Image (cartoon, helix red, strand yellow):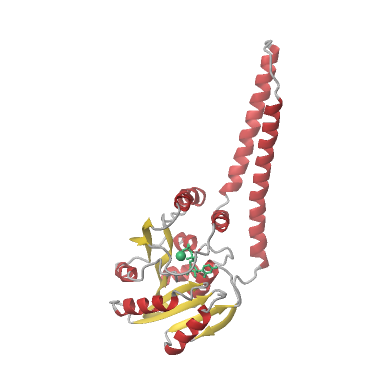
Amino acid sequence: MNNKKLSIVIPMFNEQGNIELLYNELLTIIKQLKYFKNFEIIAVNDGSQDSTLQILKKIAQKDSNFKVISFTRNFGHEQATYAGIHNTNGEAVILIDADRQDPPELILEFEKEFLNGYHIVYGQRSKRENESIFKKLTSKAFYPIFKFFTKIDLPQNVGDFCLMSRKAVDFFKRMPEKTLFIRGLVYWSGLPKKAILFIRKARYSGKSKYNYTKLTIFALENIISFSTTPIYAIIFLSILIIISCFIGVITALLMKIFGYVILIGWTSIIISILFLFAVTLFSLGMIGLYIGKIFQEIKNRPVFLIDEKINF
Ligand code: UDP
Ligand code: MG
């Protein structure tokens, strides 16, 4: 660890329009820091297809504190962040997106709370600009579901934008899993944390890399990798269905014995078949996800491959 050094990690996938502005903004902010006297910026190029890498190399040539890790191809946002964190040596680490949706000036507040003894200081979005109602609603729904299944107190409306102390980073680095949910892993440690509110603006340049399919998979994967509760939920659901079937059969028998007319409809049969089919399919899917996870972990493949490292 390097005392009084701040490491800033930025994952980047096709961010050519944002890099230089962000870099200059970060330099201005770094100059205003009170405690941190040194810094390193680690930009992780996650297989960009535009001129991101060329721009990064140009900056790295001029500034030896600006380091570049370049992947062989696109491995994903979480993998890029993970690689960045593992290559830091500062006393604290900042995670920030490249598109300037995370305002760099918040780093000054992060430093203050870090000096107050918090190990994780994170930006919490008080308002989300330019996001559809659907995205707002689904992201609102995710947190309580995640907490219900995993018992991890994941703060609401939080991205990866945060400061982690070296202690938090060391805990993070001890987690060997391949399924990366950076936020989950960061807060899993239970270290003291503090929120700083900010307004999340629209992305400055380029398009978001997340669509709804990707987000749904992301949400499911995260719950699966942190909790086995869904398996129990399936078992309880099946018990419930079996009990209601019994009740149904007994009621029908009693009605027959006491001379009531039972109308056996075609619709009800079809509905129950469909319902049971759905439950079976759902359960199979859930179990499949867990097996998939085990498969992934057992293969023990690296989650990213580094093509090039500059200024390390
Ligand atoms: N990103 C990445 N690899 C990817 C997708 C995204 O490194 O495969 C980076 C991206 O360049 C940005 C950050 O991760 O710095 C967040 O991505 P994005 O802005 O697309 O996500 P959103 O803000 O829409 O959630
Ligand atoms: Mg963004």
The x, y position of residue 155, in whole percent, is 41, 56
Q: Nearer the viewer, residue 39 or 97?
A: 97
In the picture, measured across the screen, residue 43 lies left or right of residue 296, that is: left
Relative vertical location of residue 292 with respect to residue 37 in this rendering, above or below? above
Residue at 63% across, 59% down? 293
Q: Is residue 171 left or right of residue 118?
A: right
Q: Check the image and report above or below for 38 versus 9.
A: below
Taking the spot 51% from the left edge, 85% from the top edge, the residue there is: 310
Q: Quadrant of the N terminus?
A: bottom left
Q: Residue 147 in the image: x percent, y percent?
A: 47, 50
Q: Quadrant of residue 223?
A: bottom right
Horizontal placement of 258 versus 155: left or right? right
What residue lies at 37% left-to-right and 59% top-to-bottom? 124
Residue 89 visible to the viewer: no
Q: Position of residue 260 (x, y in %)?
A: 67, 12
Q: Position of residue 227 (x, y in %)?
A: 55, 53
Task: Give 175 or 49, whichever is nearer the viewer.
Answer: 49
Query: Which residue is most to the bottom?
Result: 62
**Where, by quadrant of the figure, is residue 100 drawn?**
bottom left
The tally of labels here is 0
- The answer to whether 61 appears left or right of 127 in the picture is right
Residue toward you, 190 or 240: 240
**From this viewpoint, is residue 101 visible?**
yes
